[in-house]
C-alpha cells in the first residue's frame, strides 16, 4: 500500500498499485513571477501547493486516491517581465508541457487528471484550457478549477473580487499562512493600498505591470495581510477544490472557457 500522495516520493511499483485502484491525478501549476518587494517569486506555486495539501484527505474520502504530480513551476508571466527573476514560457511551450504530461499519463492507463492553478494571466489560463481540451480529446478527461469564473471568485475575498489583488492582501495572507518565513513583513507597513483597475487595464490591452502603474509589481493592500485571513482563504480554497474534484469524479465534466481576464 502506498504511503504518499506525491508521485515524486513513490516508486514505479507504488504507481502500478495506484493504477489498480480508483484514482485521480492532480497537476499543480505555478509561476516564477514578481510579487511585490515583499512576497516570493513562488507565491502562485505556494498557494497551489497549500490548497492541494489541505484538500487531499477530503478528496480521498470522496472515493479516489489523489496522486499529486511534480509542480510545473513556470507559466506565462509576460506582465511581470520588467522585474528580475520573472521567468516566462511561450504559450506553445506551456501547452506542450501540459499536453506531454497528459500523454504520459495516457500511456500508463491513468483514468482522470485535474489541473490546479493560481496564476491568472489571461494567456496562461487560455493555455490551460487549450491543453486540457487536447488531452481530453486523446481519451483522458481533464478537470480544472477556474478561480477566475464569477461563480467561484464571488466566494473569495473582496480584494480578489476587485481584481486588484496581485501580491496584495489576498495572496500575501496565504503565503503568511503557508510559508510565513518567505514574506518580508518589515516591508508591509510601508506599502500603501494601490488600486490600478488591473482587470480593466488588461481588457484595454495593457501587457506590462509598470505601464499599468504597478511600479513595484503589486496592487491591492499587502499591509492588510494576515495569517488568519490566509488560513480562512485556504480553508475555502481547499473546500472548493474538494467539491470540484468530487463532482469531476462523478461526471468527468469540467469548467468551460469563459472571460479569462474578467473576475
Image (spheres, grey):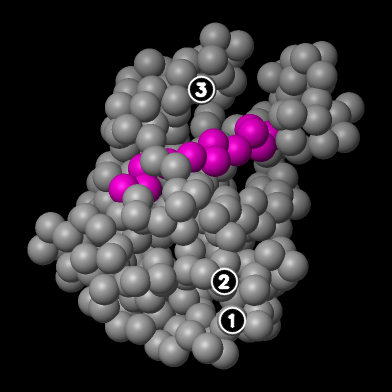
73 left or right of 256 in image: right
Residue marked by disc 1: 187
The span from disc 3 to disc 2 (Cα, nearest Å) is 33 Å
Do the numbered discs 2 and 1 sit on residues whose CB atoms are within 8 Å?
yes
Q: Can residue 50 be spotted in the picture?
A: yes
The C terminus appears in which quarter of the rendering? bottom left
The mark nearer the N terminus, 1 or 3, is 3
Q: Is residue 173 left or right of residue 83?
A: right
Q: Is residue 73 magenta?
A: yes
Residue at x 36% of width, y 27% of height: 93
* Local crowd size for mark 1, using a 10 Å CA cut-off: few (<14), some (14–19), many (≥20): few
178 vs 207: above or below: below
- Which circle marks residue 38 in the picture? 2
In the depicted view, which residue is nearer to us: 6 or 206? Answer: 206
* Residue 229 on image: x %, y %: 61, 81
Instruction: Classify residue 243 by image quadrant.
Output: bottom right
Sooner in the amino-acid sequence: mark 2 or mark 1: 2
User: Are there few (<14), some (14-19), or many (20+) residues within 10 Å of tag 3?
Assistant: some
Q: Please give left or right for residue 156 compared with residue 187 in the image.
A: left
Amino acid at each position: 500500500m502506498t504511503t504518499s500522495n506525491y508521485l515524486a516520493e513513490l516508486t514505479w511499483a507504488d504507481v502500478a498499485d495506484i493504477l489498480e485502484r480508483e484514482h485521480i491525478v492532480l497537476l499543480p501549476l505555478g509561476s516564477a513571477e514578481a510579487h511585490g518587494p515583499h512576497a516570493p517569486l513562488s507565491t502562485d506555486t505556494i498557494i497551489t501547493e497549500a490548497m492541494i495539501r489541505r484538500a487531499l484527505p477530503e478528496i480521498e474520502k470522496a472515493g479516489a486516491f489523489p496522486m499529486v504530480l511534480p509542480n510545473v513551476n513556470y507559466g506565462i508571466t509576460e506582465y511581470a517581465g520588467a522585474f528580475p527573476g520573472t521567468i516566462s514560457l511561450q504559450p506553445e511551450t506551456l501547452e506542450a508541457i501540459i499536453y506531454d504530461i497528459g500523454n504520459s499519463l495516457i500511456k500508463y492507463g491513468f483514468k482522470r487528471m485535474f489541473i490546479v492553478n493560481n496564476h491568472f494571466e489571461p494567456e496562461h489560463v487560455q493555455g490551460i484550457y487549450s491543453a486540457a481540451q487536447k488531452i481530453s480529446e486523446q481519451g483522458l478527461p481533464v478537470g480544472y478549477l477556474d478561480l477566475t469564473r464569477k461563480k467561484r471568485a464571488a466566494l473569495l475575498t473582496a480584494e480578489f473580487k476587485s481584481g486588484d489583488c496581485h501580491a496584495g492582501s489576498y495572496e500575501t495572507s496565504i503565503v503568511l499562512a503557508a510559508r510565513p518565513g518567505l514574506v518580508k513583513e518589515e516591508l508591509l507597513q510601508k506599502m500603501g493600498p494601490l488600486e490600478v483597475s488591473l482587470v480593466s487595464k488588461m481588457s484595454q490591452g495593457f501587457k506590462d505591470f509598470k505601464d499599468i502603474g504597478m511600479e513595484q509589481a503589486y496592487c491591492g493592500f499587502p499591509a492588510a495581510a494576515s495569517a488568519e485571513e490566509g488560513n480562512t482563504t485556504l480553508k475555502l480554497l481547499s473546500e472548493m477544490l474538494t467539491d470540484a474534484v468530487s463532482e469531476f469524479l462523478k461526471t468527468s465534466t469540467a469548467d468551460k472557457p469563459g472571460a479569462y481576464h474578467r473576475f
